[in-house]
Image (cartoon, rainbow, N blue to C red):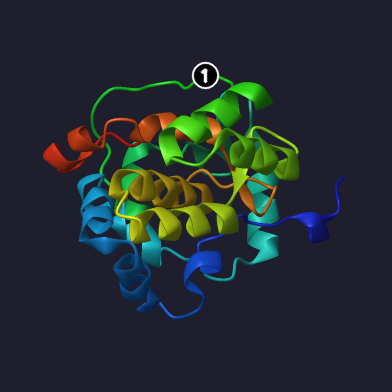
């Protein structure tokens, strides 16, 4: 048996937008049309207004009790069911296309190098952020600050990468850390020209 009080759904989109769903227009405006174009090209603009409603803990616990990790499915009274990519696309309004991919597990040292090279910050700033995160991760608030700084300096590609990493960290790749995202996901945004040319990039 387990304590149902500890059950919780994790989604941190409200940390960026608050309760006002229209605020996404103001957020995107801060990072220039170039950044907005990258978000749209990646097909994940709907994530800016994707906020979960309150979830009934009794219903949530019912699904948890029936989850079988061996088969990655729920064993319900009416039969077996699972979550498909089509379900993800329908619920989040994001495209599901292209090839499956996997990202490497980064050490703290490697994560700092990736942040330095891809976001335009100094090596010292990258290392300091990794130390504060206590993992090869970057905090949401820090990423948004970097995105805004890079956009104001005209470094729009780097601003876009920081913003996109923060966005997916708060939504489809959120974790129990509650305030940070793994730096390895930055590998998804290395080639921003490809995102712009492909309307509906692969998201799995």
Image label count = 1
The answer to whether residue 122 shows anywhere in this view is yes
- Among the 4 quarters of the image, the one containing residue 12: bottom right
- Among the 4 quarters of the image, the one containing residue 100: top left
Q: Quadrant of the N terminus?
A: top right
Q: Is residue 127 left or right of residue 167?
A: right
Which residue is at the far left?
197
Instruction: Determine whether 185 is above or below 17 in the image.
Output: above
According to the image, label 1 marks what residue? 104
Tell me the crowding category of disc 1: few under 14, some 14 to 19, or many 20 or more residues within 10 angstroms, Cα based.
few
Identify which residue is drawn at 44% across, 53% down: 167
Q: Nearer the viewer, residue 164 or 8?
A: 164
Instruction: Determine whether 68 is above or below 23 in the image.
Output: above
Location of residue 27 in the rendering, given as x and y in whole percent from the top left corner = 38, 69
Identify which residue is drawn at 31% across, 41% down: 86
Location of residue 7 in the rendering, given as x and y in whole percent from the top left corner = 74, 55
Identify which residue is drawn at 38% across, 62% down: 48
Identify which residue is drawn at 60% across, 66% down: 55
Q: Secondary structure at mark 1?
A: loop
Q: Nearer the viewer, residue 23 or 132?
A: 132
Q: Is residue 145 left or right of residue 70?
A: left
Location of residue 140 in the rendering, given as x and y in whole percent from the top left corner = 57, 54
Q: Nearer the viewer, residue 24 or 35?
A: 35
- Among the 4 quarters of the image, the one containing residue 92: bottom left
Location of residue 204 in the rendering, given as x and y in whole percent from the top left corner = 37, 34
Q: Is residue 75 left or right of residue 39?
A: right
The answer to whether residue 52 shows anywhere in this view is no
Q: Nearer the viewer, residue 156 or 193?
A: 156
């Amino acid at each position: 048996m387990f304590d149902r009080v500890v059950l919780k759904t994790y989604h941190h989109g409200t940390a960026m937008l608050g309760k006002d769903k229209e605020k996404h227009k103001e957020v995107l405006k801060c990072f220039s049309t170039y950044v907005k174009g990258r978000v749209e090209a990646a097909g994940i603009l709907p994530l800016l207004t994707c906020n979960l409603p309150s979830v009934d803990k009794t219903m949530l616990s019912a699904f948890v009790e029936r989850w079988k990790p061996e088969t990655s499915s729920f064993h319900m009274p009416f039969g077996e069911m699972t979550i498909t990519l089509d379900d993800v696309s329908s619920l989040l309004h994001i495209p599901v296309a292209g090839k499956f991919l996997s990202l490497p597990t980064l050490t703290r040292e490697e994560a700092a190098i990736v942040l330095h090279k891809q976001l335009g910050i100094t090596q010292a700033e990258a290392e300091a952020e990794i130390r504060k995160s206590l993992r090869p991760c970057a905090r949401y608030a820090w990423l948004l600050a970097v995105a805004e700084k890079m956009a104001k300096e005209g470094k729009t590609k780097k601003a876009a990468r920081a913003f996109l990493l923060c966005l997916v960290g708060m939504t489809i790749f959120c974790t129990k850390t509650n305030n940070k995202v793994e730096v390895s996901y930055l590998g998804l945004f290395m080639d921003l020209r490809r995102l712009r040319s492909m309307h509906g990039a692969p998201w799995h």
